Amino acid sequence: MSQVVIYTRNGCMQCKMTERYLAQHNVPFEERNINEQPQYVDQLKAQGFRSLPVVMPANADPIVGFRPDSLKALVG
């Protein structure tokens, strides 16, 4: 199964729902919280992202927001 990186921030309900969905479906992921790791803010902005969460699968297009329909593709 490919590695998934999820960019989140504190107090983000969609971020928590996305993390919960991935955890419940046993999709391994690495969380990068922009409140705790602000170095990722500029990187995300440079890529055109303006909202969170951003889910970046290793071999697929990024998913922005809580999108269970799109996250379903990550479930093995």
Image (cartoon, rainbow, N blue to C red):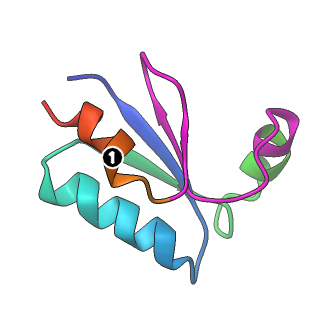
The residue sitting at the front extreme is 69
**Occupied quadrant, residue 51:** bottom right
**Image height of 17 relative to 27, above or below:** below
Position above or below: 43 against 32: above
The residue at 29%/23% (across/down) is 2
Q: Residue furthest bottom?
A: 11
- Horizontal and vertical percent for residue 22? 26, 52
Q: Residue furthest top?
A: 59
Q: Is residue 47 left or right of residue 63?
A: right
From the image, which quarter does the N terminus lie in?
top left
Which residue is located at x 21 percent, y 42 percent? 27
How many marks do you count on the picture? 1
Q: Position of residue 35 (x, y in %)?
A: 68, 70
- Identify the secondary structure beneath mark 1: helix
Q: Residue 3: x, y in percent?
A: 34, 29
Residue placed at 27% from the left, 32% from the top? 73
- 74, above or below 55, in the image: above
Amino acid type at mark 1: Asp
The quadrant in which the C terminus is found is top left
- Which portion, as a residue range, is magenta? 44-65
Task: Examine the structure image and report whether residue 58 is included in the region drawn in magenta.
Answer: yes
Residue 64 left/right relative to 70:
right
62 relative to 29 in the view: left or right = right
Q: Quadrant of residue 36?
A: bottom right
Residue 18 versus residue 11 in the image, above or below: above
- Residue under pointer 1: 69
